[in-house]
Every structure is written in structure tokens, then in C-alpha cells.
Image (tube, helix red, strand yellow):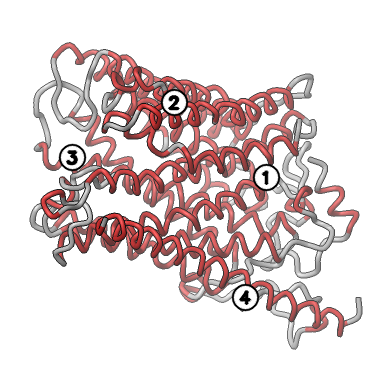
Amino acid sequence: MAQSHAPAATHEHDDHDHKPRGWRRWVYATNHKDIGTMYLVFACTMFFIGGAMAMVIRLELFKPGLQFVDPQFFNSMTTMHALIMIFGAVMPAWTGLANWMVPMQVGAPDMALPRLNNFSFWILPFAFTLLLSSLFVPGGAPAGGWTMYPPLILQTGASFPMLIFSIHLMGASSILGAINIVVTILNMRAPGLTLLRMPLFVWTWLITGYLLIAVMPVLAGAVTMLLTDHFFGTTFFTAAGGGDPVMFQHIFWFFGHPEVYILILPAFGIISEVVPTFSRKPLFGYEAMVYAVASIAFLSFIVWAHHMFTVGMPLAAQLFFMLSTMLIAVPTGVKVFNWTATMWKGSLSFEPPMLFALAFLFLFTIGGFSGLMLAIVPADYQYQDTYFVVAHFHYVLVPGSIFAIMAGVYYWLPKWTGHMYDMRLATWHFWLSTIFVNVLFFPQHFLGLAGMPRRIPDYAVQFTDWNMVSSIGGFGFGLAQFLFPYIIWKCVRGGARIGNRAWEGAHGLEWELPSPPPYHSWTTPPSDAVIARGAEH
Amino acid sequence: MSPEAHIRDDAERRRRVRRSALFFALLAAFFYFAFIVMSLVRGFR
């Protein structure tokens, strides 16, 4: 199953570029680019399905009172929107980008375990079909929030086992995908490509892979216990039987906080690729960036209880979790400083990937700062479960993770297709997204500080104005996103041909391959000279 | 590198891939069962 670096001469036959045709190419896919494409198409589809649910939420919240949906359905929308965006859109998008780029960036012909790669992708459509079909069962889709806190989640109707099974499937897919990526990075690097010569995107994915392997099974364990509590009479989290519902929260957030970094670390990798390219300078402080990512990953394991300060815990624990959370600002600050220092005195140009990267820098930092505010225990007592929290994590995930995904796609799309995309439309996509994302989420800080609770379909009239502004931002942001698949589709169909190196300042092994790259990326390992040229970080 | 050396290198790489994939799969399984067992132990105390 493992792919080989052996030269073509040692094979019985040379099947490079002999793609399977028709549906077999996709269903039986073992090629990293084909599987990467399927992940990205799947993520984009889920992004629009989850986005449609966000539109329902913003439509209902446009005015106070109940207008369009009943409260149960509203809660289903918030729950499903979160699950779909996290597990269906952002995580598969990162895995798709890793599938496309990691073998090319490490000088490998393909992923280490191509058939496992096929399996981990094809689990996903089944998982999400199951989850989405829960909208149509008696009692409706799960509505207890994506955090699935008992005892509330145990009251879910017929959709409960569907939720649990789909979470298990998503978890299995993520773990298998992560194992494949980690094994590829550790074993398939071209000779001479040492760990500290790897591109930052590969480094961030290596660390993300470790996080996934460590924490996705913890989520699986937690939901297994929920399942047995619901159907088999156990009382892990049921107080009446001697169980402890708060224990679920500890276990969930032991998974949940590293999960936040699973969603953002590959974004750091993309930004570390894009900023040097469009600054025409090497990345400032490459090794510091690697250590900063590793530190953030380590710290992510010891901060989980900052999500549950108001649950009640000893003062010493509150202090520990507050201070360890604040400590994350140090390596994050190192990264923001280094990206800025990379741009300092650089020969900057502002193509769409760089625009998205710059917006990421400003807006992710806003999300980081509001995170610091939430880390302060007495302040968190005020902010907990308000729209301030909603504003915070959406700033981290939308102009953070999703903008970085867009930066990555706009950066590598010419490499994937061999064509340059419509820059004018992509620039429009950037400006509309950036303006509307702020109109959508910035007012939610005000709403939260004024005391508007999250996860409610109706609200007091004093919150009306900012909710209207936020909803208008939401509709604008949602509409602007239709440009994204259109630009990609247009680029796949044709456009100005580009050479190996789509961007003047781009470095890395992927830019040494033709555009589009051959079906199997590096059938012979790149030479030392090519690696040295590519490793000019 | 001679073709024989490539084949040797390739076989060694396959072994390393299998070993590391198995190691990470066992690590994931350990985390899954460890958290369930930990919860059970806590419940019996």
C-alpha cells in the first residue's frame, strides 16, 4: 500500500498520467490530488449547506419576536450549523489542502497510504448524509448545541443515535486522514529534506495531525458514553445514577480546545507561505515559527477548562486555566510579529492570496484579543453565553480559518489547474467578504456586552438595531461567497496559461513541478539543488 | 543509487510506513479507551 520513491525503471510498467476514467477515477481514487479535490469539493458543498443554516439563523434574528421558524428548529439550526461548519467544511478543507500539497511539498509521489486515504474521504459523505437526514426524523435534528452537553442532549429524540454515529464516522475519518498525513510527512520526505527545511504548511499539518490523533478519540469516547447513558442504562453523566454531567464538559473540552487549534494551525501554515511570497522576502524567524506552533499545540492541552469557568471550580484551578490561556498569547504574538516583520521593507504586492492573508492578520488578531478578554475569569462571568463569545469564535474561524483556506486556494489554484484565475473577480470576492464579515460579526461584540444571550431565537427589543446590521452583513457575506466556486470553476475551464512558478516570489518544491502537476507528483525524488532552492524559506 | 539499492530502500520505507501507521492507530485507540476507563474508575470511587 505504501507508495514508493523507486525510479520508474524499477517498475514493471509506468502508469504515470494514465488516469482512470469516469466515475471509477473518483470512487476508487487513490491519487492524492483526486482525493484532495474531492475533499475540497465536499468542504465547499458543506460550507454552503452550513451557510444556508446560518442564513436561517440571521433571518430569524433580523427582528425580535418569532418570525419564520419555531424555537426547536432554530436550536437545530445552530447545532447543525456548527457541526457542519467545523467537521464538514473547515476540517475537510484542511485535509483537502494537505492531500493536494503535502506530497508535492515534501517531494513524494503520493500519500503514504493511498487506499486508506480513499477510505477516510468516503466515510465523510455517509457521515453527513446521516447527520443531515436527522432533519427529517420525528423530533427533528439535534438541538442541544454542538457541545452536546448532558442532560439536555440526552433528551434528543430519534435523531440522537444518528448524531452519535455520524460523530463517530467523522472522528474515524479525521483520525485516519491525520495518520496518513503524519506518516507521509515522517516517512516520505525526499532525501535531504530535513524537518527544519520543510515548508511551514507541512509543519503546521504535522502538528495538527498529532493533535487530531490525540483528541478525536477523546470525543469519540465521550459520545460513546453518551450513547450508553441513553440506551444501555449507564450513568456516566447522569447525576441521578451517581454520574457527573460536569465530567462530560471536562472530557468534551479536553477535545474541544485542541480542536480549535486543529482548525487554525494549518491556517498559520498557509499565511506563512503566502506572506513571504508576496513580500518577496524569506519568512522572518522560520525556526521561531515552528517552535511557536509546537508551543501553541502543547498549551492547547492544558487550557480546556477556560470554556467552563462559570460551571464552578476551585480558585486555584481558575487561576491556572486563566494564566495558561493567557500564555498562548506569547507564541501567537511571535507569529503575528514574524509575519509583520516578513513584510517589513518587502517588495509587497496585493494579489488575492495576499489580500486574504492580510485580512487574516488583522481580523484573526481581533479574535485573539477578544479571546484574551474571555480568559479573564471575572470578565468571563459577564461574557459567558453571550453574543460576545459568538463574535469571538466567529472572528477566529471565519476571517481566521476560512479566509486562510481562501488564501490557500487562491495561492495554489494556478498550480492545480495550470491557469490563472480571474483576479478582478477574486479581488471583488475579497473586498465583499471582508466588508460584510465585519458588518456581520463586529456588532455581535456590542450585543454580547449589552447582555444578549446566545442560542436564542427571540430577544429583547433593545438589541434590534445591531441584530439587523448583523443580519444584513450575514446576507451580504453569504451572497458574496457564490463568487468563490464560480471563480474556481472558471479557472478550471480555462484562462491564461502559467509556468511552473505562478507567483514571482514563490518558493517551495511544489513550484518546481509543472502546472498542472503530473498525476503522480515526484516519481523520482527532487535533487539536492532543487530541494535547496525550494527550502529558501 | 543502483536499482537493487532502490528496491531495498523502498522495502525499508514500506516497513517504516506500516510501523508508524500502526503506532499512531494504537495511540488513537489508547486515548479512546483510556478516557472511558478513566470515567469508569471515577464513577466507582
Mark 2 and mark 3 residues within 8 Å of each other at the beta carbon: no
Q: Is residue A428 left or right of residue A502?
A: left
Name the residue tied to disc 3: A75
> The numbered mark 3 sits on a residue in which chain?
A
In this view, the residue in front, A427 or A181, is A181
| Front position in the image: A132 or A327 | A327
Residue A246: x and y, percent? 25, 43
**A433 relative to A510 in the view: left or right:** left
Q: Secondary structure at mark 3?
A: helix
Q: What residue does disc 4 label?
A: B18
Q: For residue A34, which quarter of the picture? A: bottom right
Which mark is in front, 3 or 4? 4
Residue under the image location 29 percent in, 57 percent down: A223
Q: Is residue A393 above or below residue A107?
A: above
| Residue A116 locus on image (x, y percent) | 52, 72
From mark 3 to mark 4, how far is it between C-alphas? 44 Å
Residue A270 as seen in the image, left or right of residue A534: left
Asked if the residue at tag 4 contacts the one at tag 1, i.e. Cβ–Cβ closer than 8 Å, the answer is no
Whether labels 2 and 1 belong to a single chain: the reply is yes
Callout 1: residue from which chain? A
Question: Which label sits in the foreground, 2 or 1?
Answer: 2
Discs 2/3, front: 2
Query: Label 3 crowding class (10 Å Cα cut-off): few <14, some 14-19, many 20+?
Result: many
Among numbered discs 2 and 1, the one appearing first in the sequence: 2
Residue A416, which numbered label? none
Residue beneath the point at 26% across and 62% down: A130
- Residue, disc 1: A496
Mark 2 is on which residue type?
Answer: Gly
Disc 1 and disc 4 on one polypeptide chain: no
